[in-house]
Image: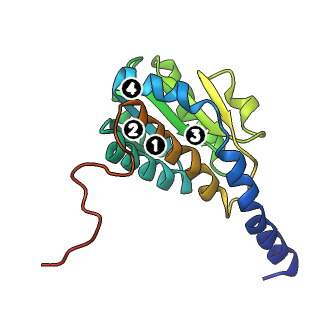
Amino acid sequence: MQKSNLTNLVNAIKSIPLNVEKALKINYLNELAELIIKYNGAMIIGRGTSYGIAMEASLKIRELSYINTLSIAAGEMKHGSIALVDDQIPIIALTPYDDRLFYKTLSNIQEIVARKGKVFAFTDCSGKPLLDSHCKAVIELEKQMHFVTPIIYNIPMQMLAYTLAEKKGFNPDQPRNLAKSVTVE
């Protein structure tokens, strides 16, 4: 590995605590939580590492708030999942800006909006101007090196799950029907 690449990785890792702190201060989560509760469901899309975040967010929302959520790889939207889109299900798009995947996900968002879908995107300063005209809201996170993006984007998703549980009157620290340890027969 070249010294400049190693330096960039080290700097990205060192930036994590400050960027986590900033991600914890996002103030749009209450409004998004109210909308999800109103419709009692949500779809979360992502591409690449963002799909992993979408899966974890969907799982955490189900575990803590008992709201039906579905995670979909953005690239699979054309293969049947687009049929689920209407104005009755909020769609959260995890779209960090990069040249490889951002524009493909933007295309998916445009298809969703064309079908009256309500999209709430999480992106950075580079992606925000490109998403503003398509989405109901664009929540801006700090621009990250691709290596640490999943860590930072996971924070507001976890906080959204927590907020949803609290708004529904559930204790997010004690979800029902979940074993807290693995048992082997």
| First in sequence: mark 2 vs mark 4 | 4
Residue 99 shows in the view: no
Observer-side mark, 3 or 2, equals 2
The residue where tag 2 is placed is: 165
Cα–Cα gap, marks 4 and 3? 25 Å
Read off the residue under disc 3: 105
Callout 1 touching callout 2 (CB < 8 Å): yes
Q: Secondary structure at mark 4?
A: helix
At mark 2, the secondary structure is helix
Determine which quarter of the picture holds residue 167: top left
Q: Earlier in the sequence, mark 1 or mark 4?
A: 4
Q: Would you call the spot at circle 3 few (<14 residues within 10 Å), some (14-19), or many (20 or more)? A: many
Tag 4: amino acid: Ile
Comparing 76 with 140, the one in front is: 140
Mark 4 = which residue? 37
Residue drawn where x is 46% and y is 22% of the image: 35
The three-letter code of the residue at mark 2 reads Ala
Mark nearer the viewer, 1 or 4: 1
Residue drawn 59% across the image and 57% down it: 150
**Disc 2 packing (10 Å; few <14; some 14–19; many ≥20):** many
Q: Residues within 10 Å of mark 1 (few under 14, many from 20)?
A: many
Q: Position of residue 180 (x, y in %)?
A: 29, 64
Residue at 62 percent of width and 25 percent of height: 137
The residue shown at (38%, 19%) is: 88
The mark that comes first in sequence, 3 or 2, is 3
Q: Secondary structure at mark 1?
A: helix
Q: Is residue 106 found left or right of 69 in the rendered image?
A: right
**As displayed, is residue 84 above or below residue 94?**
above
Q: Which residue is mark 1?
A: 162
CB contact under 8 Å: marks 3 and 1: no
Instruction: Specify whether 82 is left or right of 124.
Output: left
